[in-house]
């Protein structure tokens, strides 16, 4: 069973904050003494650990960013000797140096504990069969949910990603009840299950989906097709992996594991700390990690924190689903555009005419940005012509203009012509960067 005690998740906020303050003071001293890179950043601001007395002093500390992690690669932010470390995990698909995170055994235990909370919040017990098809290896998704599933006591299917036929066979034969994967792969599995006509053999009751952005409309689409309740989960390799926060049955934000992480919202331009309820960039401080304890790490995710009581009884602060990123949002003709806005429009107008598979292509012609969106038609529209292609394209263009404030060209393409993803979906091609 999980290491944590249930009362941790229902501790009064004043006790949570007091505990965070105590752990912060200890962690700052620990990092200052053991991480020369961060000590230099503190000293550059004229700070020592003696200047940090509690949460009220958190804002004084310098930020860490992904550029710091790359600059300090591979060992510059390591706080423990290598002999104390038992594993690394690494980010995927980034340019330049990868981010490598280190773990002691204690770090792994706490991380798996957080993932166990996510599974239990989705209704998981030791009677469930947990089907994990996040990628394993350097990616944190598979190892994190695998360990969390073990702690809950589920029968764990370590499927990893790919080989959809095998995924569905094991799902049917072994009676998987909880599915863990990216939302885009969940949508692909749902599509494949319906195509094979085996939905009546599927026993899934819940899905825990993360590692990429997805909209409420996509959630409803997956829930309807698989007959499950779909839960969001959030995490970063830099902090541990999935399980930093997770949804409960209320599905009104993800509870942050505040006994391990302090969350702040800042103005992404000025770095000023914003009050709860404000929209801004999410910053995390890890207060229990040993090997790779980041302080004031800028996630670049844009969201809102909510401390109002949750009907589930958990008292840990909730974060909204990320509303985009402060560093990779698309700026098209001077307008900020988030891919989730486009996805929201597509899924609202889809009906039975288009699928959730789409691709955003940004270019530049005559010094003007162009926005093209390829959207895959459903088999039904392709064969039965429910609505004319031209009329549907015009409808989507109109709704996108209303949502984004700029025009886009929409191209309905034949079924199965957009590559499916078994990992993180590659939704955007920005040719302006080439």
Image (cartoon, rainbow, N blue to C red):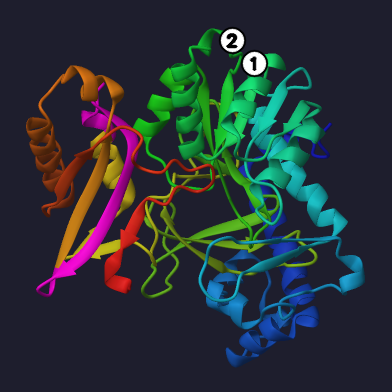
Residue at the (50%, 48%) spot, across then down: 424
Crowd tier of the residue under label 1, counting other residues whose Cα lies within 10 Å: few below 14, some 14–19, many 20 or above: some
Q: Say which residue label 1 marks.
A: 172
Check residue 361 for magenta coloring: yes
Is label 2 in a helix, a strand or a loop? Answer: helix
Is there CB contact under 8 Å for labels 2 and 1? yes
Residue at the (87%, 72%) spot, across then down: 82
Q: Earlier in the sequence, mark 2 or mark 1?
A: 1
Q: Which span of residues is magenta-colored?
A: 347-368
Q: Position of residue 331 (x, y in %)?
A: 25, 65
Crowd tier of the residue under label 2, counting other residues whose Cα lies within 10 Å: few below 14, some 14–19, many 20 or above: some
Task: Note whether 294 is above or below 220 in the view shown.
Answer: below
Residue 341 is at least partly visible in this image: yes
Is label 1 in a helix, a strand or a loop? Answer: helix
Q: Nearer the viewer, residue 283 or 198?
A: 198
Quarter residue 57 falls in: bottom right
Residue at the (34%, 34%) spot, across then down: 356
Residue 122 is at least partly visible in this image: no
Q: Say which residue label 2 marks.
A: 201
Q: Position of residue 197 (x, y in %)?
A: 48, 12
Q: Specify the quadrant that holds the C terminus.
A: bottom left
Q: Position of residue 230 (x, y in %)?
A: 51, 28
How far apart marks 2 and 1 lie (CA) works out to 6 Å
């Amino acid at each position: 069973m999980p290491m944590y005690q249930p009362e941790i998740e229902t501790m009064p906020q004043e006790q949570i904050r007091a505990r965070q303050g105590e752990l912060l003071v200890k962690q700052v001293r620990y990092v200052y003494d053991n991480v020369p890179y961060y000590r230099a950043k503190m000293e550059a601001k004229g700070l020592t650990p003696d200047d940090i007395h509690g949460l009220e002093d958190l804002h004084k500390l310098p930020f860490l960013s992904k550029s710091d992690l790359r600059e300090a690669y591979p060992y510059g932010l390591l706080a423990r000797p290598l002999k104390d470390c038992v594993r690394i995990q690494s980010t995927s698909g980034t340019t330049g140096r990868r981010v490598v995170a280190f773990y002691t055994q204690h770090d792994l235990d706490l991380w798996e504990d957080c993932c166990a909370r996510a599974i239990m919040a989705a209704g998981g017990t030791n009677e469930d069969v947990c089907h994990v098809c996040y990628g394993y290896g350097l990616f944190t998704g598979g190892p994190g949910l695998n360990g969390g599933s073990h702690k809950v006591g589920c029968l764990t299917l370590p499927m990893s990603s790919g080989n959809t036929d095998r995924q569905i066979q094991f799902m049917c034969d072994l009676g998987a009840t909880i599915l863990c994967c990216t939302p885009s792969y969940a949508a692909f599995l749902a599509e494949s299950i319906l195509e094979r006509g085996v939905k009546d053999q599927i026993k899934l009751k819940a899905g825990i989906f993360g590692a990429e952005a997805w909209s409420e409309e996509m959630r409803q689409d997956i829930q309807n097709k698989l007959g499950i309740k779909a839960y969001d989960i959030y995490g970063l390799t830099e902090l541990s992996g999935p399980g930093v926060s997770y949804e409960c049955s209320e599905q009104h934000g993800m509870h942050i594991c505040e006994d391990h992480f302090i969350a702040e919202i800042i103005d992404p331009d000025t770095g000023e700390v914003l009050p709860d309820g404000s929209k801004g960039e999410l910053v995390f401080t890890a207060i229990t990690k040993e090997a790779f304890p980041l302080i004031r790490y800028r996630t670049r995710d844009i969201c809102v924190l909510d401390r109002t009581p949750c009907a589930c009884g958990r008292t840990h602060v909730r974060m909204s689903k990320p509303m985009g990123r402060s560093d990779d949002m698309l700026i098209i003709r001077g307008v900020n555009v988030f891919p989730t806005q486009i996805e929201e429009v597509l899924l609202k107008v889809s009906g039975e005419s288009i699928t959730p598979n789409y691709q955003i292509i940004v270019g530049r012609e005559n010094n003007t940005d162009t926005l093209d969106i390829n959207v895959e038609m459903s088999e039904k529209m392709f064969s039965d012509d429910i609505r004319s292609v031209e009329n549907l394209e015009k409808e989507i263009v109109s709704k996108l203009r209303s949502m984004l404030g700029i025009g886009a060209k929409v191209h309905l393409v034949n079924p199965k012509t957009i590559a499916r993803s078994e990992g993180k979906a590659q939704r955007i091609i920005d040719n302006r960067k080439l």
